[in-house]
Image (tube, rainbow, N blue to C red):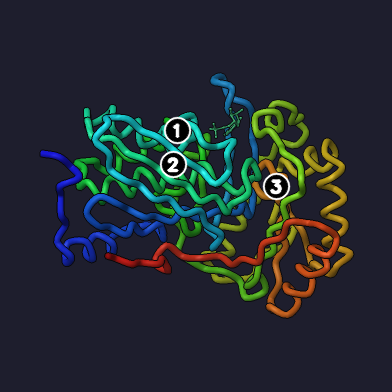
Amino acid sequence: MGYSSLKLDKFLISMQNARMGHAQQAQISGSVCFVRAYAKINLTLDISGRRADGYHELATVMQTVDLYDTLCLTATDDARVSLICTRPELSNTENLAARAAQLVRQRLAIRQGVEIELYKRIPIAAGLGGGSSDAAAVLLALQQWWQLPLSPFDLLDMATALGSDVPFFLTGGLALCEGRGERVTTLAPYWPPSMRWLLLLKPAISVSTAAVFRNLPATDYTDGTHSRAISAAFQARSTPRLEDLYNGLERSVLETYPEVARARDDLLDAGAPFVRLSGSGPTLFAAFSELACAGRVQELMQAQGYEVHLSRAIHPDAGYVCLY
Ligand code: C5P
């Protein structure tokens, strides 16, 4: 049976969308499927050591934010995966989104081809998980759209093979991620009022995650304390202590990349109450209780030439669903 000829019953589709664990809700029609892929920030990042496989053992609390890429998947008859992106340097089949589609096809011996159009809004190589989220969105969209016999374990296994952050994006929201990042514990949604509005500032440099991890001295290792403290505070619906919003890569990134240190100082000078690095950076985030303050700081930073996105934390159920 050709997958593209599958026509899904509308009731079934809405049941499936209701069940989806992430805001990445697929919009399904005959041969085209749209899906959103949201970015994340790391509230904490505790790195406890280097493992024998070269990866680092970590604990991190991540939260989905409402900055997103849009993917359009089209079923094709040419038995291949192709990808076109609004960022030409990402328009190739090495792109994690294309590799996710290829992995699904291989795993289930599917002949049907897929063309992926990727409208990139999330800054790339920025510590916001854009590539990982695109890959997870493709896994989830194909599973729903083509009604694939993939268990949650199968999805997790494929996500882990694609990258350490990809498993988080299968569920999204607020989660504690451990191990390489692939051991995801979803936490009850909570977001402190003092952090209602987020500014995401992307300094105009690229940072290699691998290089940042490789150069991390053991003196920056921590044993997961901050991640456990933030998880506990959010579960108790209480305001986190600023010292627990800790990123073990931040000291090293600020020291190695003066552009990031300067951007951090500029954000603080403009009135941000506090500033933290997301993931391996270079994106910095600042949180505000009031939109007016966030907007003022955003304007000041943009006037200095910075790329700044005004965003907010979102919960998986807050997704945008549109069927046609
Ligand atoms: O898993 P992913 O391919 O996204 O990781 C990118 C790079 O970041 C890895 O090649 C590795 O150098 C580093 N990394 C790490 N420990 C982790 C996750 C990533 O050292 N837990």
- Residue at image x 40%, y 53%? 171
Tag 2 near tag 1, CB within 8 Å: yes
Q: Quadrant of ligand 1?
A: top right
Instruction: Give the image location of residue 113, x and y in percent.
Output: 28, 35
Question: On the image, numbered disc 2 is attached to which residue?
Answer: 135
Query: Which mark, by number, is residue 162?
Result: 1
Q: Is residue 225 visible?
A: no
Q: Mark 2 Cα within 10 Å, few/some/many (few <14, many 20+)?
A: many
Q: CA distance from mark 3 to mark 2?
A: 25 Å
Residue 135 relative to residue 224: left or right:
left
Instruction: Give the image location of residue 23, x and y in percent.
Output: 41, 61
Q: Amino acid at mark 3?
A: Asn
Q: Nearer the viewer, residue 142 or 193?
A: 142
Residue 32 relative to residue 308: left or right:
left
Q: How many marks?
A: 3
Between circles 3 and 1, the one closer to the viewer is 1
Element at label 3: loop
Q: Quadrant of the C terminus?
A: bottom left
